[in-house]
Image: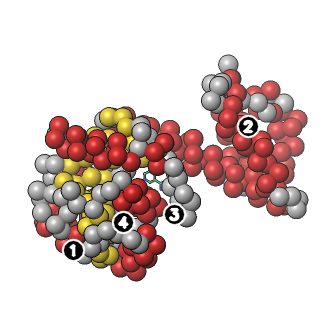
Amino acid sequence: MKIGIVGSGNVASHLVRALKNAGYPIAGICSRRLSHAEKLLNEIGDFEQATIATESIEDLFPADVLILAVNDDSILEVAQVLSKIDPGSCVIHTSGSTALSLLSEHFPNCGVLYPLQTFSKDRRVKFSSVPFFIEASNKKTLDLISSIAYNISERVVEMNSEQRRRMHLAAVFACNFVNHCYVLAEQEMIKCGLDFELLLPLIDETTSKVHRLSPQQAQTGPAIRNDKRIINLHKALLGQPEQEIYQLFSDNIQRYKL
Ligand SMILES: NC(=O)c1ccc[n+]([C@@H]2O[C@H](COP(=O)([O-])OP(=O)(O)OC[C@H]3O[C@@H](n4cnc5c(N)ncnc54)[C@H](OP(=O)(O)O)[C@@H]3O)[C@@H](O)[C@H]2O)c1
């Protein structure tokens, strides 16, 4: 079974490596900018079969399965192009919040292979422990996606589009917004000439605590104690919109106080 990859970004670059390591022949990597597809192909290297880099999706055929690891706003556009080339293709996207129906309107055999992890191109991830959430338009395609997922990961769960969207929203809070808080924290450290690294033991313990305590039980700090004097001192150090963010967070922490 040959797999064609559309996209050469964060997810595509990890996925193509994992699929290759699992022994799947890769028909090619297609990216909007040819140089990006070529760069990824060169970085991975050592493909057993002839694998191409291209900017035209047609060149990926005769792939049996096409994985669209493109930004969410491009999935529909790529699906529309693909449906004109071969509506019989098995097409899979990797998005958390894009419904399966976006593909099933175009392809009878389609599905979702959503990895719940944060991928950055230059940071290696242990794929076997990344949970994959899968969905498909029919049993045959579900079995196919399930076998691909189990060949690259130990954790595979079937989930519908609605649940997946809600889980992705939770992931935005748990990962993207938390990371943005690190950005804000780093700015405050820089203002007084301190290194962000000093915060790492605190960050590590905060993350590790929620393996044992519920997030509500684990909360500490001026907001949960309702220490108004400290809250006002902190707010006085901030400009806008950070002062507003601080107040919104503090109010929201109070709302969830046990
Ligand atoms: N990053 C994560 O942590 C993560 C985790 C789980 C799921 N996802 C999902 O995985 C998908 C990809 O995310 P990402 O973070 O990998 O995005 P990304 O790094 O921004 O990469 C997007 C890729 O899509 C390509 N692309 C866009 N339009 C295209 C088109 N018309 N034809 C061919 N290629 C096209 C871009 O090509 P060029 O580079 O050539 O412009 C780029 O390589 C999204 O659905 C996202 O929700 C992401």
Query: Which is nearer the N-term, disc 1 or disc 2?
Result: 1
The answer to whether the beta carbon of the residue marked 1 is less than 8 Å from any atom of ligand 1 is no
**Between marks 3 and 1, how big is the CA–CA gap?**
24 Å
Residue at left offset 46%, top offset 45%: 128
Up/down of 47 relative to 103, above or below? below
Around disc 3, counting alpha carbons within 10 Å, would you say few (fewer than 14), some (14 to 19), or many (20 or more)?
some
Q: Earlier in the sequence, mark 3 or mark 1?
A: 1
Residue 160 quadrant: top left
Q: Position of residue 178 (x, y in %)?
A: 63, 46
Q: Secondary structure at mark 4?
A: loop
Which secondary structure lies at badge 2? helix
Tell whether circle 3 marks a residue whose Cβ is less than 8 angstroms from ligand 1.
yes
Residue 13 visible in rendering: yes
Under mark 2, the amino acid is: Glu
For the point 83% across and 58% down, the residue is 195
Q: Residue at x 40, y 67 (%)?
A: 8
Query: Do we see residue 96 in this rendering?
Result: no
Task: Of the two numbered discs 4 and 1 on the same chain, state the one appearing first in sequence.
Answer: 4
Near mark 2 (Cα within 10 A), the count class, few <14, some 14-19 or many ≥20, is: few
Which disc is residue 59 wearing? 1
* Image quadrant in which you'd find residue 29: bottom left
Q: Earlier in the sequence, mark 3 or mark 2?
A: 3
Where is mark 4, residue-wise?
7
At x 73% / y 43%, what residue is drawn? 203
User: Cβ–Cβ below 8 Å for labels 1 and 2?
Assistant: no
